Image (cartoon, helix red, strand yellow):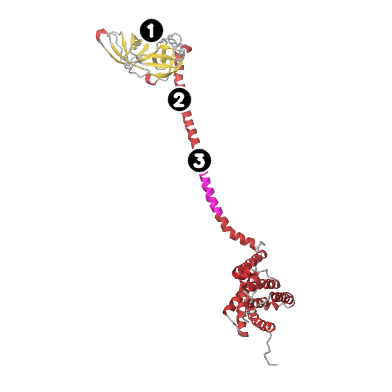
């Protein structure tokens, strides 16, 4: 060992110095009684520790940011789904409110007439350039029979032409060939309302001598044993003398067939309206 | 003196003598530490042996000196390790003959040693007594002078004159 030290005198010198520095450091204490070597070790390690802490903060911060982004993204998606669900709920509630309003019209209708219509939803409305038909979700199982009148709060819709267990086909009053016995105006001029196939109605069998003013209300008489007596049909939009001594009367129906959503089917025999 | 070495037994004797003188006499005479005997003997050993031996002796003698002064062990040890190591290197460049030359050399070594000791005390936050500058100069000068005398006396003891007279 001596020979090793003699061959490497600087190594021996630094070894001696290091050992004495360690000896010194374990004896000397700082003002607060802390052993100096501990203070020196802390001072030497502190920058390293701070550097490691900074790196860990950066890595941890990045990881936390990624986790936050993922969490926020998940939450965002959940909120979007919730938002959509609530939006649908709002739509449904609005629709229910509108339905309540429409049903209230049917309620008033049933109070005015001595029949209670069976409410049914329109499940299919045929385009009005072929046959004026629609399907409803009430059928034989609900007591619907052929030739039963189908009405809406604003007026006559048509009649049942075919019925199966859970649905029925309705011929609209505007269909070519459909008809209803009616009276028009304050004079109650009698005639027959029939569909023209183009969304309008005409009143036939009215002589030219009978005056039916434009804007007069046309209502059903009930003589066809289909539509309830006194039920509105439409208003006169054209009234002029026609050929063959028959007056030409055009009627616009009160019901907007393209926007119907619920209809009432008259199950029992129609009665005359009460006089209030 | 060139080529002269110091035996291990001689180093041991010097070590024990230093320990006795500094620890015992230092208690009796408080002014005794003004002569840095450890430095003188460290320089002697380093001068006449090897850097490693000089450093080792400096470490050992320095620890004794710390014990005598009541300082934390290692303050004088560090400085005297460097002095003992450096003494042999100086011998390679300088060949001081005569009392004055050795006095100057030992004074410089003592100055370096004291500077390191006071510097270490300062770094450790130890308060330096007022007027330490004069103490520094005094210790350095007296150690240098005493050292050159001790060097000469010890040389005379170790290397007695040869009588070449014809009997």
| SS for callout 1 | loop
C-alpha gap between disc 3 and disc 2: 34 Å
Provide the residue designation for mark 1. A224
Spot occupied by residue B91 in the image (x, y as percentages of width and height): 59, 78
- In the rendered image, residue A28 lying in the magenta stretch gets the answer no
Provide the residue designation for mark 3. A72
Q: Chain of mark 1?
A: A
Provide the residue designation for mark 2. A95
Spot occupied by residue A70 in the image (x, y as percentages of width and height): 50, 41
Q: Residues within 10 Å of mark 2 (few under 14, many from 20)?
A: few
- In the rendered image, residue A68 lying in the magenta stretch gets the answer yes
Q: Are marks 1 and 2 on the same chain?
A: yes
Q: Residue furthest bottom?
A: B167
In which quadrant of the rendered image does the N terminus of chain A lie?
A: bottom right
Q: What secondary structure characterizes most of the magenta part?
A: helix
Q: Is residue A192 visible?
A: yes
Spot occupied by residue A169 in the image (x, y as percentages of width and height): 41, 14
A57 over B131 or under it: above or below: above
- Residue stretch in magenta: A52-73
Q: Residue furthest left?
A: A243
The nearer-to-camera label among 3 and 2 is 3
Q: Chain of mark 2?
A: A
């Amino acid at each position: 060992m001596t020979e090793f030290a003699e061959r490497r005198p600087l190594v021996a010198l630094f070894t001696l110095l290091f050992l004495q520095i360690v000896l010194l450091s374990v004896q000397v204490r700082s003002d607060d009684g802390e052993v100096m070597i501990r203070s020196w070790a802390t001072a030497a390690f502190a920058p390293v520790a701070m550097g490691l802490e900074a790196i860990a903060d950066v890595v941890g911060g990045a990881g936390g940011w990624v986790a936050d982004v993922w969490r926020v993204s998940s939450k965002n998606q959940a909120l979007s789904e919730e938002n959509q669900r609530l939006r649908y709920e709002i739509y449904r509630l609005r629709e229910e409110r509108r339905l309540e309003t429409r049903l209230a019209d049917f309620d008033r209708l049933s109070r005015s007439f001595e029949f209670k219509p069976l409410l049914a939803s329109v499940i299919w409305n045929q385009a009005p350039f072929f046959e004026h038909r629609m399907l409803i979700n009430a059928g034989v199982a609900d007591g619907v029979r052929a030739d039963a009148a189908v009405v809406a709060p604003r007026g006559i819709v048509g009649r049942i032409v075919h019925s199966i267990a859970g649905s029925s086909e309705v011929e609209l009053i505007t269909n070519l060939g459909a008809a209803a016995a009616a009276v028009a105006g304050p004079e109650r001029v009698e005639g027959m309302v029939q569909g023209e196939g183009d969304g309008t109605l005409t009143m036939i069998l009215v002589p030219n001598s009978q005056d039916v003013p434009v804007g007069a209300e046309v209502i059903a008489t009930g003589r066809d044993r289909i539509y309830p007596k006194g039920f509105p049909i439409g208003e006169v939009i054209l009234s002029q003398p026609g050929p063959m001594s028959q007056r030409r009367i055009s009627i616009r129906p009160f019901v907007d067939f393209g926007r119907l959503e619920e209809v009432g089917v008259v199950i029992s025999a129609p009665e005359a309206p009460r006089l209030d | 003196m060139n080529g002269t070495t110091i035996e291990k037994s001689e180093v041991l004797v010097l070590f024990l003598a230093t320990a006795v003188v500094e620890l015992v006499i230092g208690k009796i005479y408080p002014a005794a530490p003004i002569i840095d005997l450890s430095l003188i003997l460290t320089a002697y050993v380093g001068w006449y042996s090897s850097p490693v031996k000089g450093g080792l002796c400096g470490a050992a003698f320095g620890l004794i000196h710390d014990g005598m002064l009541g300082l934390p062990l290692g303050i004088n040890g560090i400085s005297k390790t460097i002095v003992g190591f450096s003494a042999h290197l100086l011998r390679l460049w300088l060949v001081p003959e005569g009392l004055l030359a050795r006095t100057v050399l030992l004074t410089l070594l003592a100055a370096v040693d004291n500077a390191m000791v006071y510097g270490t005390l300062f770094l450790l936050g130890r308060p330096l007594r007022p007027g330490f500058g004069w103490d520094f100069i005094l210790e350095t000068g007296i150690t240098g002078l005493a050292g050159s005398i001790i060097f000469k006396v010890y040389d005379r003891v170790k290397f007695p004159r040869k009588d070449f007279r014809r009997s």
